[in-house]
Image (cartoon, coloured by chain):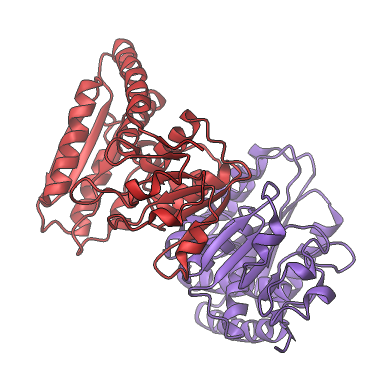
Chain colours: A red, B purple
Amino acid sequence: MTSRSMPGTDLAATIVKATAERAAEFERLTGTKPCLATVIVGDDPASVTYVKMKRNRCAKAGITSRHVPLPEETTTEQLVAAVRELSEDPSVHGILLQHPVPAHIDERAAFEAIAPGKDVDGVTMHSFAAMSFGEPGFASCTPGGIMRLLEDYGVEPSGKHAVVIGRSPILGKPAAMLLLAKDATVTVCHSRTRDLPSIVRTADIVVAAVGKPEFVKGDWIKPGAVVIDAGYNEGNVGDVAYAEALPHASLITPVPGGVGPTTIALLLEQTVTAAFAAS
Amino acid sequence: MTSRSMPGTDLAATIVKATAERAAEFERLTGTKPCLATVIVGDDPASVTYVKMKRNRCAKAGITSRHVPLPEETTTEQLVAAVRELSEDPSVHGILLQHPVPAHIDERAAFEAIAPGKDVDGVTMHSFAAMSFGEPGFASCTPGGIMRLLEDYGVEPSGKHAVVIGRSPILGKPAAMLLLAKDATVTVCHSRTRDLPSIVRTADIVVAAVGKPEFVKGDWIKPGAVVIDAGYNEGNVGDVAYAEALPHASLITPVPGGVGPTTIALLLEQTVTAAFAAS
């Protein structure tokens, strides 16, 4: 068996290039660029950096972004009102509400203020159900990026056992649903799971989405498994002990340069799709 | 180890009794009974029987039902319009669209015409996402009934491995999500799953929702597992080979008299809850 690193950079570049062409086409047809509204509450440094990076990528792809920074003390009502305004604004095509929001805010209420047609980050209940039922809608960007990555590397989920570690509404759960839609047998594990290593050892595809550095150990990986590390922790470390896992896996995403670039590429792609759908 | 049958009849009777009391209270407060609209398209004998039974149970619990039978040749547009009218009618508190609908109809479109506040059968995308995310909303009645049954028999899903066989939008998927919400480690299996018996053998809780008579064999059941048979096939046969499985299981639902009665009880309970919420 040969082990291979599974970077997402080339795939992301391909998606971004095609997206930039579609954005230019949109501008040619309508006289305006696709527009992504980015909403951030407070000034958490990591969130500020993420949003800045996303806006830079938008600009490079010919997508305008409208930045809406709100103070830390913003209430749920104020945030919902701000998001709703963007939902109703025809010059905005997609809305990204950077999470996490401060703890005093009802994040779900804020997400639900995003119109389904502008939910290019795939965070609403509607988008989740659409992913789950194979109905039209936007994918959560990281799970959507993971599925594209699997496809790009010729990994066919059908009949495989996929183990998703993590059950967040924007990562673990939608990843599980998208893998299920591709006919994988899917197990969702989490903090209450007993004997996680032995469950992971049965996986043909592992998706690590826990947010704990090097949480998944090398000897948990079945020989030949495909390992998708959706974690990103301080110090450029993923949720999988990469060096340990590499010799066991047939394919394994590096951190950084694995899932991350495809996540942003999906965000841009879906923004342009939303713009065309609205026009 | 002792094996026990796990009927749902007592639990259902308890739920129906409490529901009838709440329905009477609703009538006392508002001067009208809670009202469930039942919509059926065509005259499939099994569906006709189901709807008749549900309406009879409603009547016994002090819930009015408004029956809307539509001809086999009803179009998606006509069905959506009929359901939407019920969604907008303040005298209707809950809506049940009996499925399956004829193949020429877009069932999802029809389900989505049910207002979330009247989705007492838990079939809309909103209800599914609400179950998945622990947000307020109605449960799909069979999965909701299964969770109540587990609770009633003192089965604590947390940390257990639950294997759900079947992935339909109103049974397998919501059952998986509700078990996950109760901290079970959940595996969803289906027709493409490889070596299903060996996966089921790892389950502490098995939910069979395949719609194939006696599909799950006795020797697939781990000693002491809890077996929930959500199937109902011709000739009063479930999805599990009951007699074979009984000696292996610690608890196993019979068919009939297991999951079925709790499903209808949940429908009545949620109808009265919807009536109170709307008043």
Q: What residue is shown at x 35% (from left), y 37% (from top)?
A: A120
Residue B225: quadrant of the picture: bottom right
Residue that protrudes farthest toward the bottom in the picture: B2
Q: Which of B89 and A253 lies nearest the eye of the viewer?
A: A253
- Determine the image quadrant of residue B271: bottom right
- Where A226 falls versus B177 (above or below)? above
A144 shown above or below A33: below
Determine whether, in the image, residue B216 is placed left or right of residue B164.
Answer: right
**Looking at the picture, does residue B182 appear above or below residue B11?**
above
Above or below for B56 versus A7: below
Report the quarter where the N terminus of chain B lies.
bottom right
Estimate the x, y position of residue A57 in percent, counting from the top left.
22, 28
- x, y percent for residue B150: 60, 78
A115 vs A144, nearest the viewer? A144
Residue at image point 21% right, 52% down = A79
Is residue A187 visible from the viewing direction of this image? yes
Would residue B34 be seen by someone viewing this image from the given angle?
A: no
Of residue B204 and residue B77, the one placed in the foreground of this image is B204
In-image side of A229 versus A198 (left or right): left
Q: Position of residue B183 (x, y in %)?
A: 46, 70
Residue at 71 percent across and 53 percent down: it is B99
Residue B92 percent location from the top left of the image: 58, 62
